[in-house]
Amino acid sequence: MLNKNLREEAINNLKRQQKEYEQQNNNLIKDAEKLFEVRIVFKSTIDESWDFVNSFRNKPADLDTELKAIKVETKKFANLVDNLELEIEKANIASGGTAASGVAAGVGVAAFGPTAAMAIATTFGTASTGTAIATLSGAAATNAALAWLGGGALVAGGGGTAAGSALLGLAGPIGWAIGGGALVTAGLLKSGKNKKIAEQANSEAAKIRKYVTVIKGTRKEIGEIASTSFTTKELLSTMLIHCKSFQGDYKQLSTEEKQRLGALVNNIKAGTELLNRTVGANA
């Protein structure tokens, strides 16, 4: 049959791209979960360090002001997690416990467990309205998801709507990525001539490759945030141990001790910034 080999080669290529796309999406979820786990431990270290510094008597006014600002930033992460837990609980109650996270990642997906839902929401942030992505649904969720990654925000070199669509792929079908090679093949085989089928398959494979590139760039940034967060947490823990021998009156501290305490505060502040950093925030 004319162009039969061309058709088969194109369809096989499409299947390979689809498989890679699905694997990268799965890995993205795992990466987000790992980051979330690091952040939960990191927040405990930040809270412990903040409590220690705040316990000092006779703190100067500027230090007290800085501590209050840090607490506000820390609460952002805690409040987001608390709100997500409430939304997931509501979804489970409404569905008799089967929803898991029906509003996961703001794309109306019930396939994610609660941890994955919170991981994705804390990784990608909130909609411009201030509403947590994971609490949105329908068109509002779609628009918000596209907005997160639109305008070249990703380290992959941008992507705009295509980048947003790649993330929405976590929710289900995008283009030809339907979760089954047989479905893809069947859909193409209905369309007619071999050459046309091959062209369609190659075109869709090219689209999926773009999405894969964006997802890989996103995964790289998630990994960098996780690595930096872990390193900062370890440094913060070490600094806290060294400072715990200080007496509790700021006025009685030596110049060197005050400097070390100031360095601890600076690292607490850096920690809160990392805690709330979302993918694409620094692009």
Image (spheres, helix red, strand yellow):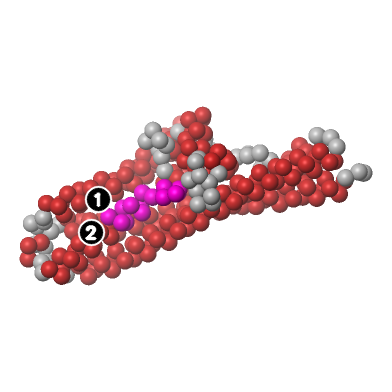
Q: Is residue 165 above or below residue 220?
A: above
On the image, the x and y values in percent for residue 100 come to: 49, 41
Residue 275 colored in magenta in the image: yes
On the image, the x and y values in percent for residue 223 come to: 47, 58
Which residue is nearer to you in this view: 116 or 144?
Answer: 144
Which amino acid, by three-letter code, is at mark 2?
A: Val
Dot 2, how many residues are within 10 Å of its Cα: few (below 14), some (14-19), or many (20+)?
Answer: many
On the image, the x and y values in percent for residue 35 come to: 44, 55
Residue 195 colored in magenta in the image: no
Q: Are marks 2 and 1 in contact (CB under 8 Å)?
A: yes
Q: Secondary structure at mark 2?
A: helix
Q: Quick check: 268 left or right of 32?
A: left
- How many labels were placed on the picture? 2
Q: Quick check: 102 left or right of 260?
A: right
- Real-space Cα separation, disc 2 to disc 1, in angstroms: 9 Å
Can you identify the residue that label 1 sits on? Answer: 70
Residue 30, visible in the rendered structure? no
Label annotation for residue 265:
2
Residue stretch in magenta = 269-283
At horizontal 75% and vertical 40% (from top left) the residue drawn is 200
Which residue is nearer to you in this view: 58 or 80?
Answer: 58
Q: Quick check: 9 left or right of 100?
A: right
Label annotation for residue 13:
none
Q: Secondary structure at mark 1?
A: helix
